[in-house]
Amino acid sequence: MVLKLSGVIPPMITPLDENERLDKEGTKRLVEHLLEGGVNGIFLLGSSGEFVALKTEVKIELMEEVKREVGKEVLLLAGVSEPGTELTLEAIKTAGEIGMDGVVVTPPYYFPLCKDGVLEHYRFLGKNGHVPVVLYNIPLTTGVSIDLDTIQTLAEENLISGIKDSSGDFIHFRKLVRAITKYPNCNVMQGHEALVAPSLMVGADGMVPAYANVFPQMYVDLIKAFGNGDVEKVLSLQDQIDKCIATYSYGSVYGSIKFALKKQGICQEFLTKPLQNPNLEQKEKITMVLKEIMKK
């Protein structure tokens, strides 16, 4: 099973109401906003989607709702990470039944894992899940960094379709891109937004940027500028991205994004507990950033 990852694939936030149920109207507006921005795909139930804190029924409802809205227009990915392999396999089967094109999987979290454990986790899922698997390397939250040897082994065995790397380690990322070039059915996506411009320059296939929830076209324009060899515009857009992601420290990453989306009239800013929204002063700063970017 081949899954081509490229361009801009935002990790979509999960619009919620005050009771942490799915906000269907907000979800519809957000999907329309992303599609109008020209994204190449949508990644549901990642970190930005607050997947670890959502009820199972909300996860299923979100996938079903977005699938109805999108159809086959763009690629749909779903995060299915769980603390154990069998639990992850169950989540993969559910995502496949709903119609997701691929699944995104972190290493199991909570229990410390050795290199062989990580390899066997992905090998089992690649052989038994029957849905294309994308590795998600995010050691900050899992406590596990997927090494190059493991990734190359899985790519050589055709058990993975790509990697989303959110390690923030650019040296590792550069080595990863070079190592994966020999496997044409496996793509490398940058998940750390401060590194999107340099990542394209060393051969990344695309990006998975959280602030693309708010300004999807900004990231699409960066990809286009890179393709046109317009380095000045690429760097200018990276500067704008840097201003946006500086707001991630306000309350919580996802609180900042949801407040920005509320300002755009797309969805409410409700978060899963105990995540915090930005305070009044922080909201004023986010509003100033939004106004500055929208003038560009």
Image (cartoon, rainbow, N blue to C red):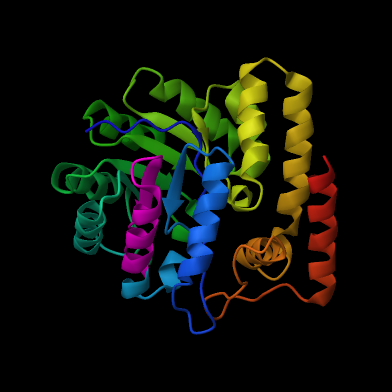
For this rendering, which residue is in front, 270 or 73? 73
Residue 146 image offset from top left, x and y in percent = 40, 43
Which residue is found at the position 41% from the left and 47% from the top? 136
Left or right relative to 264: residue 81: left
For this rendering, which residue is in front, 53 or 296? 296
- Magenta part of the chain: 59-82
Is 190 placed above or below 99 here?
A: above
Q: Is residue 166 visible?
A: no
Which residue is found at the position 23% from the left and 30% from the top? 158
Left or right relative to 197: residue 119: left
Outermost residue on the bottom side: it is 19
Outermost residue on the left side: it is 128
- Find out whether residue 60 is within the magenta segment: yes
Left or right relative to 140: residue 58: left
Is 90 placed above or below 53 here?
A: above
Q: Is residue 26 visible?
A: yes
Q: Quadrant of the N terminus?
A: top left
Q: Quadrant of the C terminus?
A: top right
Which residue is found at the position 63% from the left and 43% from the top? 193
